[in-house]
Amino acid sequence: MSNLSQAEDHEVCLVDDDPSVLKSMHYLLASEGLKVRTFDKAEDFLTYASAHHVPVVVTDIWMDKVTGLEVLARLCAISPKTRVIVITAREDLAARATAMAIGPVAYFMKPFDDEKFIAAVRDALNRGEK
Amino acid sequence: MKAPTKKGQSQSEEQLSLLQTITMEVAVADDLDSALEIVLREVCEKTGWVLGQAWVPNPDTDVLDFVAGWYCGDGELKPFRALSEESHFKPGLGLPGRVWKSEQPAWLEDVTNAPNFPRSAAARTAGLKTGVGIPILSRGKVIAVLEFFMRESREQSERLVNVITAVAGQLDLLKRATRAEAAAREEQFRTLANSISQLAWMADREGYIFWYNDRWYDYTGTTLEEMQGWGWQKVHHPDEVGRVVERIRVAFATGEPWEDTFPLRSKSGEYRWFLSRALPIKDTEGQVVRWFGTNTDITEQRELEQALRENRDQLEQKVTRRTTELSRTNEILRSILSNMGDAVVVADKDNNFLVFNPAAERMFGKGALQMPSTEWSHRYGLYLADKTTPFPHDQLPLLRSIRGEDVDNVEMFVRHEKAPHGLWTEITGRPLRGANGDVLGGVVVCRDITELKEEEFFRAGQSRVLEMIAADAPLADVLTSLVLLMEGQAEGLRCSILLLNRDGKHVRHGAAPNLPDAYVKAVNGAPIGPRNGSCGTAMYRRRPVVVTDVMRDPLWTDYRELALICGLCACWSTPILSAQGDVLGSFAMYREEKRGPRPEETRLTDIATHIAGIAIERQRQQEILREREARINLAAESADLAFWILYPEQNTAWMSERGRRIYGFDSNLPLTCDLILSRVHPDERPDVKATYDRSCALSGTFESEHRLLLPYGKTRWVIMRGRCLKDDEGNLLETIGVTLDVSAQKQADLQLQHQRDEMAHRNRVSLMGEMTASFAHELNQPLTAIANSASAARRFLERGNIDPTLLKELLQDMIADSQRAGEVIRGIRSLVRKEAGVRTILDLNAVITDTVRLVSSDVLSRESVVTTELDPQLPQVNATLVQIQQVLLNLIMNALDAMEGLPPAERRIIISTRSDKGDVAEVRVRDFGTGLPKEKPDKVFDHFFSTKQKGMGMGLAIVRSIIESHGGTIVGENTPDRGARMIVRLPAVRGQTQTVAAA
């Protein structure tokens, strides 16, 4: 962890295997003037997170190969300070419970309210600054 | 002196006689007009003119007026005469005017073409040709003009003109009757008499000849002095003169005309024969004033007659000789005719019989009788072939021959008291012709063909019986006809046929039309055996039994009384055998006299048993066939089958009763191939016809499932199976087959299909229920993207720093995501729709990829993995997309369920495809779960079989029905290591390249 490069404090990482969802979230956050980094594969993000400071990540749960739950679990190890916002298109109480146990700052069912989502992202960023 | 020719002689004679007549008649005429009429008539009648007319000058007008006419009575002459009556001729004009003016006779050879003949047109119409005009002069003055016409063209005859002129001169006598004139007239007459060729003379009333013409003196070389009075006797032959004198004296005494023939000596001393005639000329009181005679030389005529007489004598001798020869020939001929077997009848032109030989007398029952030919048929008993219609008179061969016809082989039936049964004769006739070819009569030769004819009838009778057999007439009728035929062949013969029962031990009545009922009843049902009458024994021994006296023969012990009652004495029976040698029955002959069969009767028996054998055997075969048909019909009835046979060549058909009901045909309706085809539903008829034709061409079998459209619109589902039969040359003979009514089954199938569809639908709905999470996920993704993009766009706008390109991109994304959401909804909807949709050409690889994506969310949530190993060479299939998706979803969900108890890392599903020789597309779904029941892996496909707590047990049953409805198969098996494998095989589409991508 000594050689972690310093990412910008308010950069938001987005992880979703659905390209159109990923792209639309990117623009949504960009419209609020936020810096956004997108990943369509969870593995790519985890690689990135292990080398960079990632203050906030927004991740989908149900993705091929590596699920959002794994991302959550792995982040606890490689970047414990990263604040995680989970989004999912599928109502799954078990997954929600698991995710909440690991500890994301927010949990959204797709499709979600844009104001609340942005507020959640900003809130997560601000928490890191404090 | 050269004797005049006969013709000239007779003409002269006539003219002379004319002169005599006219002279006498004119002498008694009252006036000129009536005298003219006499002259016209006499001249015309005696010298061959058809028309004579007289003209007299009219002193007042100086023209010729018509005063009298005579014509032969021919109507065609009337117009000419009428024209003449109205005509008047000036001197020099026309024929009368010319003669009047010239005072000379005028001769016109062709009045129709004469220059000075104004009546030529009328003459042409009347057919007149020659005309002559003669003046009548009195004291150098024309007192009348006569004209005569004839139809022939005739050269001018001076003599004729002279005669007429001389005759006309007689009229002058009348007009100016004075002594001097009379003298002149006599002189005229003498001149005329000298002009003729005969010797002529005149005598006073006592017969004193006072004048001879020059011819007399020329011939006799005598003088008047020697000849006058009775001096003429000197030139007569001494042998004849007495008779001549005697006869002529009688004539002179009585005043009767005289005629005689005698020789006269010429001046050279030779005698020539003359015909002499003398006529008395009488005055008005009828007193003979004078005799006028002529002698005509007939020597040559007599010589000719003599020669003729001699000729005739010779001829008569010849005739006598020939007659003798002929009578000898006749004798031979008569002998032949008497002894020949054929009847010969000859008749002359008047239908009188000339020959009627003994054979003819035998054939026709009597000899030649004189009677009109119209009675021949009746009297000789001649009939047409029907034996009842009398032979038509005008068609009788003899009469036809007499008419000149050749008659060949006319058959006639003859019946009379001496031949009460009649006989048949074949007649040939020819006309009898004289040397010049004229028909003199006719001859007929009649051959007795009774035996031939009877044989012919017998054969025809046999043919009739055989025809009855061929036409399947009732056996009893056939056998009765056969017995009657046999009985008709011999007098006093009675026959019977008995049939052997199938038990081979008892007989039953076959036919015995002329045996008493009592006998028939007694025999019917009797057993056969070694001593059972003629028939029972013959059938038992299988060989003929001849009983010549039933009263004594031990075989008849049990039947003697019966025979006595029936008047039977002899009975010969022969067994009737089948082609295989089985006894079918017996044929028996009965006689009322004690004797055995004659060769002719044995021959009849052979024929009768042969024909009876055919009839009985055929009837047995018919019975067998009928029984077989009845059995077939019974089978058809119970199996709901129509049996049918089509005869395409004749366009006829047969169909079993049940078949007729299936097809809606009346029992009696004659069927045709077309009629049967017309019952096929119009929508399917072309296909059925094509299938049938194809099969016929290949001589194969065919099967077709189709609907029938019956009267009143009812439809039936049937399966028609048939086979085409051909002869050795490949011609289609018939098509036989069955039609199975599958309407009920079809109805059940349709219901089952409906239920199956319902189940499949429920299965899909149920699957949907299980997959709602997946569907929600699938739908929420694009919705999220849309919402995000929209929100981003709004925010950029609110900030006022939006790049239009960015905005456009956002909107574009929203549209694309909306479409994606729509696709998801459509996919779901198609799965829950009740109808599964239509079959299309599908690429199973694409369908698998899409389906896996659809369940990916569920797969993830169940912490499972689905991997695919797809064969790029997989052939396409013809299938319903939704149903294939349904199959895949069921298999995937089952696999997921089977692996629930496993650690997530082991939860794997492998879906693979491969092509099997290009004929089959195979899909395998393999899991690593609990596997199938060990004993019966296929039990999982049964209805209501489930290994799961919540399962209905319908999924795999539906899967199988879907696959089978696509003509495919599905099997389940346990894999050696762990888990189960489902293998789906679907038939590949050949030659299809079009791919319909999965939705």
Image (tube, coloured by chain):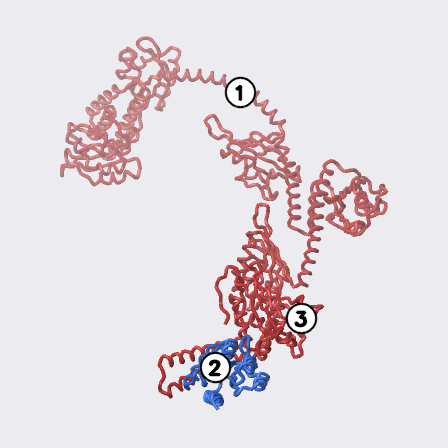
Q: Secondary structure at mark 3?
A: loop
Chain B pictured colour: red
Query: In the rendering, at what x and y percent does residue A11 appear?
Result: 45, 83
Residue at (69% x, 55% y) in the render? B626
Query: In the rendering, at what x and y percent does residue A48 appear?
Result: 49, 78
Same chain under badges 2 and 3? The reply is: no
The N terminus of chain B: image quadrant: top left
Q: Secondary structure at mark 1?
A: helix
Q: Secondary structure at mark 2?
A: strand
Pointer 3 residue: B931
Residue at (65% x, 48% y) in the render? B470
Specify the label residue B323 is tagged with: 1
Residue B978, compared with residue B22, is above or below; it is: below
Q: Is residue B422 left or right of residue B17?
A: right
The answer to which quarter of the image holds residue B597 is: top right
| Residue at mark 2 to residue at mark 1: CA–CA distance | 166 Å
Residue B569 seen: yes
User: Mark 3 — on which chain does it sit?
Assistant: B
Question: Mark 2 belongs to which amino acid?
Answer: Cys
Question: Mark 3 belongs to which amino acid?
Answer: Gly
Closer to the chain start, of discs 1 and 3, is 1
Colour blue maps to chain:
A
Nearest-to-viewer mark from 2 and 1: 2
Specify the label residue B217 is tagged with: none
Kindly give the residue lying farthest to the bottom in the view shown: A130
Pointer 2 residue: A13
Question: Mark 1 belongs to which amino acid?
Answer: Thr
Q: Do residues under tags 1 and 3 come within 8 Å of each other at their CB atoms?
A: no
| Residue at mark 2 to residue at mark 3: CA–CA distance | 44 Å
